[in-house]
Image: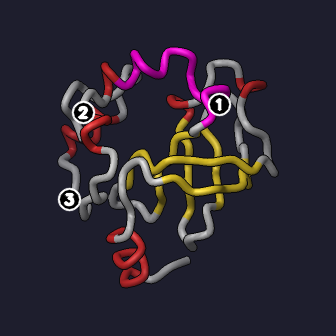
Amino acid sequence: MVTDAEWTRIRRGLRYGQVFEGTVVKVPRPGAVGIFVDIGLGVGGFVDVLLLPERSDAWPTEGTVADFEIWWADSRRQIRLKPTDPRHLRSDFTDFVERIRPNWSSEVGRSVPDPEPLTSDEMRSALRPDGPPTGFA
């Protein structure tokens, strides 16, 4: 577990789209949660189920070494990742990004901002089954 100061230091060096080689360390509930990835920074990496293929047998398995991009980081001490290998992405990823995160391409290369606390409405919105509304993030 990293300290607040270490997390702040690590986070300041992160950029959206930055690629890390990582090892899948845990797939707790295939098809339901996502995968945990060690990218060697001392904080956890996580790929959300929403970014992975619908069929969990297409997910990378524990021990898989692959490249992952920084997709998001919020107030949790965890880096949200997306696989770079299209075999490990949802089949409609391009459409998904256009709906959920239309500014993604312009965010690539930008620093991950320091987190601001979410309001309860923002939290509920982010947890909707169809994802956050356009422009959220």
Q: Looking at numbered disc 3 in the image, what kind of residue is underneath it?
A: Glu
Measuring 42% from the left and 82% from the top, which residue is drawn there?
Answer: 6
In the picture, the quarter occupied by the C terminus is top left
The three-letter code of the residue at mark 1 reads His
Query: Which residue is tagged 2?
Result: 103
Per the image, label 3 sits on a secondary structure element best described as loop
User: Camera-side residue: 136 or 109?
Assistant: 109
Quarter of the figure with residue 89: top right
Considering only vertical position in the picture, is 130 above or below 125? above
Q: Give yes or no for contact between labels 2 and 1 (Cβ–Cβ under 8 Å).
A: no
Secondary structure type for disc 1: helix
Count of all numbered marks drawn on residues in the image:
3
| Earlier sequence position, callout 2 versus callout 3 | 2
Q: Is residue 76 left or right of residue 113?
A: right
Q: Position of residue 17 (x, y in %)?
A: 42, 47
Q: Residue at x 72, y 50 (%)?
A: 24
- Residue 95 position within the rendered picture, expressed as x and y whole percent measured from the top left: 39, 15
Question: Which residue in the protein does label 3 denote?
Answer: 116
Looking at marks 1 and 3 on the same chain, the residue that comes earlier in the sequence is marked by 1
Q: CA distance from mark 2 to mark 3?
A: 19 Å
Residue stretch rendered in magenta on the structure: 85-97
Seen in the picture, residue 81 relative to 136 is either above or below; the reply is below
Residue holding disc 1: 88
Q: Secondary structure at mark 2?
A: loop
Choose mark 2 or mark 3, whichever is in front: 2
Instruction: Give the x, y percent position of residue 26.
Output: 73, 50
